[in-house]
C-alpha cells in the first residue's frame, strides 16, 4: 500500500469502526498513521466530526464553562498582594544553589549561564538563559521542600473514599487562614462530610494538596520569581503549568507534582495517559496546546468529542481577544511573535521522546493504576 489516499481511507475506516458502526477491519499501523499525518490532520479531523457522533450540547457547554472559569481563575496569579506574599515564601539563595548544583552535575542545562540577580528579578538584568535555569530550580525545589503531596481525600472518620459534593461556606477559622473557598467531600461509606479549604493564602500555610493545588499555587510562584506563567488544564483530570522562555522561543512545560520541566510527552509516553484536550490559560490569552503534549495527535482525534473543533477554536480566540484588548501596538506585535513561536513548536516539530520518561510519581500505586497513569497502559 503505497498510495497515501488509500492509507488515509484505511485509517478512516478504522476510526469509523471504532465508533461501532461496523466491525473493525484491521488495526491501524504506524505507517498508516504517518501517512495521515502527512496527508493533513485537518482533513481527518473534519471527517472524524462528520463520521462521529455530534458532541452533545451539555458536553460542549461543560467544556465552555471550564474555559470560562479557568480564564477567570488566572487573575489571582498576578495579584500584587499575593505575589508579595509568595516572594516572602521563596528561599532565593536555596534556589540559586539548586541551579548551581544542577549545573555542576551531569544534568547540566546548556541554557544556563551568567550571574544570579536578586529577586524579584530586574527585567533588564535577566538573560534568557537565567530564566530557564530559574524555572528548573523552582520546579525542583517546590516539592518536597515546600509543598507535599496529599493522597485523594479520605474520610476523617473511617478512612473511606470520598466524593466531591461542591463548595461550602468558609468558617471564621478558614477565613483567618485565607481560605475564601472550601471544597466539601462526602464519605461514600459513612456519609461524613470532610471540609477542604482551597485558596492560595491557605495553601501557603497548609503546603499540601493534589495536582490541582500544586498547579494552583505554583502558577503564583512562577510569576512571583519574575517568570511568566500559564495554567494548563487537561480533560483527563490533570493540571500543570508552563512558563514562557524567550531563549527557547516558546512556552515550556512545568509540572511541580513531578519536578518536571520541558517534558511535554511525560503524560502521553511516560504515564501512558490517553489525552484529548489540553488547554493553556495565561494573562495574554488561552490556547489549545493538545498537540504539544500528544505524540500521535491523529490517533487522539476520536477522543476529542466534547465540542466541535470550530466552536472550541472560537471560544479560545474570544478569550485571547478579550485579554489583549487595549494593549499597545508594540505589545500586541510582541505577543504575535510569541504566538508564531508557539505555532512552530506545536505544528512544526515532530515531538520526540528521546529521554526516558518516568511513570507518575505523585499518588499511591493503586490510585495511579485506577487512573491509568502508572505507565502500564500504553499500547
Ligand atoms: Zn467515612
Image: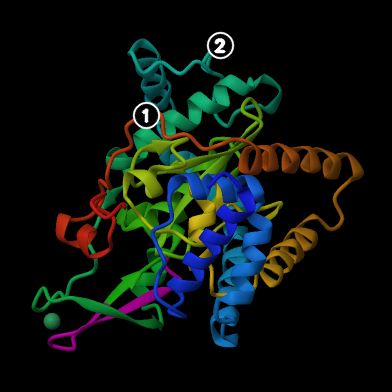
Does dot 2 land on a helix, a strand or a loop?
Answer: loop
Q: Which quadrant of the view contains residue 144?
A: top left
Rendered image: mark on residue 355: 1
Please report whichever mark, 1 or 2, sits nearer to the chain's N-terminal start.
Answer: 2
Mark 1 neighbour density, 10 Å: few (under 14) some (14–19) many (20 or more): few
Q: Position of residue 243 (x, y in %)?
A: 56, 40
Residue 219 visible in this rendered orientation of the protein: no
- Asked if the residue at label 2 sits under 8 Å from ligand 1, the reply is no
Q: Position of residue 128 (x, y in %)?
A: 63, 23
Q: Position of residue 291 (x, y in %)?
A: 56, 50
Is residue 161 toward the left or the right of residue 331 in the image? left
Which residue sits furthest left?
158
**Does residue 229 sit above or below 127 in this rendering?**
below
Tag 2 residue? 114
What is the spatial separation of the Cα atoms under label 1 and label 2, in whole angstroms?
27 Å
In front of the other: 138 or 109? 109
| Residue in the image at 91% along x and 44% along y | 329
Q: Which quadrant of the view contains residue 188?
A: bottom left
**Does residue 243 sit above or below 267 in this rendering?**
above
- Whether 189 is among the magenta residues is yes
**Does residue 45 sit above or below 117 in this rendering?**
below
Q: Quadrant of ligand 1?
A: bottom left
Q: Which residues are magenta?
A: 179-194
Q: Position of residue 305 (x, y in %)?
A: 54, 73
| Residue in the image at 15% along x and 60% along y | 366
| Residue in the image at 65% along x and 49% along y | 39
Q: Which quadrant of the view contains residue 229?
A: top right
Does dot 1 land on a helix, a strand or a loop?
Answer: loop
Q: Comparing marks 1 and 2, which lies closer to the viewer? A: 1
Residue 86 visible in this rendered orientation of the protein: yes
- Whether 173 is among the magenta residues is no
Amino acid at each position: 500500500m503505497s498510495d497515501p489516499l488509500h492509507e488515509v481511507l484505511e485509517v478512516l475506516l478504522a476510526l469509523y469502526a471504532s465508533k461501532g458502526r461496523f466491525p473493525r477491519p484491521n488495526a491501524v499501523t504506524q505507517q498508516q498513521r504517518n501517512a495521515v499525518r502527512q496527508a493533513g490532520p485537518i482533513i481527518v479531523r473534519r471527517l472524524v466530526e462528520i463520521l462521529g457522533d455530534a458532541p452533545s450540547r451539555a458536553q460542549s457547554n461543560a467544556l465552555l464553562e471550564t474555559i470560562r472559569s479557568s480564564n477567570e481563575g488566572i487573575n489571582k496569579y498576578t495579584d500584587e498582594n499575593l505575589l508579595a506574599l509568595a516572594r516572602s515564601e521563596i528561599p532565593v539563595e536555596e534556589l540559586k544553589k539548586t541551579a548551581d548544583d544542577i549545573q555542576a552535575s551531569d544534568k547540566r542545562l546548556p541554557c544556563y549561564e551568567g550571574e544570579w540577580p536578586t529577586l524579584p528579578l530586574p527585567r533588564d538584568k535577566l538573560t534568557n538563559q537565567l530564566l530557564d535555569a530559574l524555572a528548573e530550580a523552582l520546579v525542583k525545589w517546590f516539592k518536597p521542600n515546600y509543598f507535599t503531596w496529599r493522597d485523594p481525600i479520605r474520610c476523617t472518620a473511617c478512612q473511606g473514599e470520598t466524593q466531591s459534593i461542591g463548595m461550602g461556606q468558609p468558617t471564621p477559622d478558614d477565613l483567618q487562614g485565607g481560605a475564601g473557598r472550601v471544597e466539601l467531600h462526602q464519605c461514600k461509606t459513612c456519609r461524613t462530610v470532610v471540609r477542604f479549604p482551597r485558596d492560595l493564602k491557605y495553601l501557603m500555610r497548609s503546603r499540601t494538596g493534589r495536582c490541582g493545588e500544586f498547579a494552583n499555587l505554583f502558577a503564583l510562584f512562577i510569576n512571583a520569581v519574575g517568570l511568566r506563567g500559564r495554567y494548563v488544564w487537561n480533560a483527563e483530570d490533570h493540571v500543570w503549568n508552563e512558563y514562557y522562555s524567550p531563549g527557547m522561543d516558546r512556552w515550556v512545560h512545568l509540572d511541580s507534582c513531578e519536578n518536571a520541566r520541558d517534558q511535554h510527552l511525560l503524560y502521553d509516553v511516560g504515564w501512558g495517559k490517553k489525552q484529548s484536550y489540553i488547554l493553556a490559560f495565561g494573562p495574554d490569552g488561552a490556547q489549545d496546546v493538545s498537540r504539544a503534549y500528544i505524540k500521535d495527535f491523529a490517533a487522539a482525534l476520536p477522543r476529542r468529542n466534547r465540542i466541535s473543533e470550530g466552536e472550541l477554536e472560537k471560544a479560545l480566540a474570544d478569550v485571547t481577544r478579550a485579554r489583549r484588548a487595549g494593549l499597545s501596538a508594540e505589545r500586541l506585535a510582541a505577543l504575535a511573535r510569541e504566538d508564531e513561536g508557539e505555532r512552530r513548536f506545536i505544528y512544526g516539530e515532530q515531538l520526540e521522546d528521546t529521554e526516558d520518561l518516568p511513570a507518575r510519581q505523585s499518588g499511591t500505586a493503586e490510585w495511579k493504576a485506577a487512573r491509568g497513569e502508572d505507565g502500564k497502559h500504553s499500547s
